[in-house]
Image: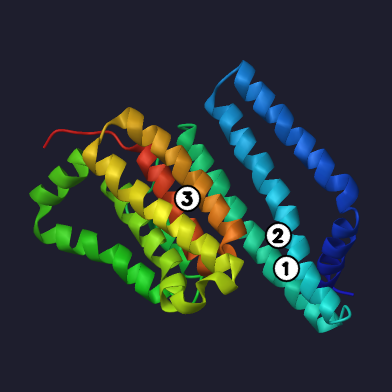
Amino acid sequence: MDFLTRFGLGLVSMWRRKVIILPILFAVNLLTWVYFWIRPSLIGFALIILTIAIFLTVIFIGVIPVAIMEENNYDPGVVRRMGLGTLISLIIVYAVFIYVSSILLALIKPPSYLFVMMALLFALPPLTPIVVLAVLIPPLIGYFIRDKWRSLRGRIPFWGVYLGLLSAVILLLMPIMYFRVLFVSTSLVNAFILGGITLILSLVPPLLYPRPEACRVLGLVMVFLGILMWILAAGGLTWGGSVLAIVSGGYLYDWRPRSK
């Protein structure tokens, strides 16, 4: 039995202990809320988000990969495939979480040219080519109007706004395409709601009130929305919407106005 098959069966074994695991995770999350209430800090907020993410991850594993394995009577090929897909998904999402948390805690700075984000998106078909092209267009245009491009990014949190809009567009794509059957699927409803919230938050606060303190709060909210998309809206639709929202939150949090 190879590693991926054992990993898939390990997920099944974990889910069978959900009566013990989920209450423990819920209790740990409550403790992080108490800690944050007593000593408010970014570390406390990060712990809250992390414990919520782990709690929802366990539920996500139980209702999708484990359910698929059970439906196929634990066929070795299906178990191996679910183990591989889940492992890759967890690595991507938690790597992004750690990366953005490091930005929020001022341990590292966001990359100047979004290389990290685009590298992640290349692993997220089928919208990858379109999204990567959309990300590349602004700096390409900015190359020919450098002064205005620099001034724009100094006056508003451009990348936070732009990536948030892309996230909202990706998330709203499926609900709009299948609007007539919107209420048939919970994921479509969740995608429609979260996409609408992300669209409004990406446009209104940072454009009408582009102040560092407001953008810091909005950045934390966008990270939280990205995690909710991952869990509640079909993985943020090929993870793209979720990843973009999380990275958008990192850029919003880090943005500072600058002179021309």
Could you tell me the amino acid type at mark 1? Ile
Callout 1 touching callout 2 (CB < 8 Å): yes
Q: How many numbered discs, if any?
A: 3
Q: Earlier in the sequence, mark 2 or mark 3?
A: 2
Secondary structure type for disc 1: loop
Q: Residue at x 41, y 63 (%)?
A: 118
Q: Amino acid at mark 3?
A: Ile
Residue for point 83% across, 39% down: 24
| N-terminal label among 3 and 1 | 1
Residue 82 spot, x, y in % from top left: 74, 73
The label shown at residue 60 is 2
To which quarter of the image does residue 251 belong?
A: top left
Q: Quadrant of the N terminus?
A: bottom right
From the viewer's perspective, is 60 left or right of 192? right
Q: Residues within 10 Å of mark 3 (few under 14, many from 20)?
A: many
Q: What is the crowding at mark 2: few (fewer than 14 residues within 10 Å), some, or many (at least 20)? A: some
Q: For mark 3, what is the residue?
A: 246
Whole-percent x, y for residue 222 in the image: 45, 45
Place of residue 90 in the rendered image (x, y in percent of width and height, measured from the top left) = 66, 58
The residues tagged by marks 1 and 2 sit, at their Cα atoms, a distance apart of: 6 Å
